[in-house]
Amino acid sequence: MSALSQAVPVIKPEKLSPPPAPVAPRSGGPWKTLVFLVLLSIGGYAAYHSFFKPKAPAADTAVVVRTAKVTSGNLQRTIRAGGQTSAREFSNVVAPLLRGPEGNRDLVLMKVAPSGALVKKGALLAQIDGQSMQDHVDDLKDTIEAADSDVRKRKAEQGIEWESLQQTLRLAKSAYDKAKLDASVGEVRTDIERQLLNLSLEEAAASYKQQQTDLASKEISQKAEIKILEYTRERHTRHRNRHVIDLSKFTVNAPMNGLAVMSPVFRGGEMGQFQEGDRVSPGQQFMKVVNPNTMQVEANVNQSESSEFRIGQQAKIRFDAFPGLELHGRVYSIGALAVGGWRQNFYVRSVPIRLMIEGADPRVIPDLSASADVLLATAENKTLVPLSAVRSENGKTAVFIKNGEVFQKRDVQLGLKNDSFAVVESGLHAGDEVRLN
């Protein structure tokens, strides 16, 4: 048997399992956490050194200490009071009160003196429209003339009536005398005739007496009728005279020499001044004439400071409208009672005071906002120290005085003070250097 024919064993391949897939590295892992902790530590260290760790002062940084010199001089203590200007001598100009039946009607200003004009006594200040009233006065004149004519006419008619009554009375008296004469010859008459004559005599006597009574009543009636007509005429005359007086008041003249100042009025939703064409009510003030040489400041001071003020104290007065203007004045009036404000300020009490302005300036007019520094006390030739250098501890006052390169504490006694300085009674001398801060 040949070698080729010899059976060769067949080796079957084994089924092999696939190789394991490579494992992917984990996304975080301990390295990332370690890096985060390192960065956090570095950030915290930087923040500590930047914000919390105190910095050592640089070698060239110097501590600044403010100082001031103790001086000598005069010290004045003042209190400022704010208010507005007004005139001590003035005269209010009001719309006239009408005496006629139409006394409550509004009046129209036809002419008005310009506000701020200097006027002399007797000069025209305002002219009120009175044409309708003048027409009414003319009508009343005609009515009075008609009433006077009625009186004269009625007197003439009564004269005729009176003469007629007198004639009737004379006829009645004649009839009475005739009847009495006829009755006196009754001896030759019969009884019936005598009775008839007596009846005629009684009738004539009664008629005559009645005529006398009627004449007296008629005289009283005529006098009363004339009186009524005269009263009617007098009523129209008085009515006219009242309007004539009202018309004379429609021309308003200046009562004194001074400055004409118009009063404020609320018109069209805003404040203004009276002008030509405006309506005013009887008795309403629309102008004021002031003496510009007698000006004052009406101010208010807090009730807690009112005891510091005395009549006659000097003051320096300044005006908001004129910053460079300063006038002297003095206190001449202090209110007796404190007054309160409105609403939330009701419990804040103030005392009104008035300061007379000494001297005059043409720029000073009423209703200017002003302030007055009232002089309360003065200290002359005294040692003065700034209040910012004074320290108060346990009821004592002290300052830090410079001694070489250091400051030493020293007790002092103070006197008069104002808002900036204090008088040193003891403990310091002029020229000493004290610490402010």
Image: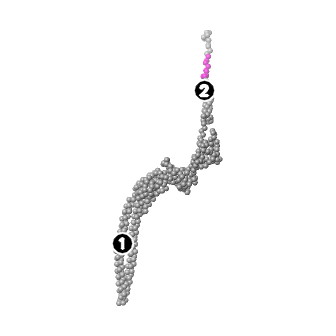
The one of 142 and 208 positioned closer to us in this rendering:
142
Q: Quadrant of residue 173?
A: bottom left
Position of 173 with respect to 81 (left or right) is left
* Disc 2 packing (10 Å; few <14; some 14–19; many ≥20): few
- Return the x and y of residue 266 as percentages of the image width and height: 46, 53
Q: Which mark is residue 420?
A: none
Mark 2 residue type: Pro
- Return the x and y of residue 17 as percentages of the image width and height: 61, 22
Mark 1 residue type: Lys
> Relative to residue 139, is residue 308 depicted above or below?
above
Name the quarter where the N terminus is drawn. Answer: top right
Name the residue furthest top. Answer: 2
What residue is shown with label 2?
25
**Secondary structure beneath disc 2?**
loop
> Relative to residue 7, is residue 227 depicted above or below?
below
Name the quarter where the C terminus is drawn. Answer: top right
What residue is shown with label 1?
155
Q: Which residues are magenta?
A: 11-19
Q: Distance from label 2 to label 1 (Cα)? A: 147 Å
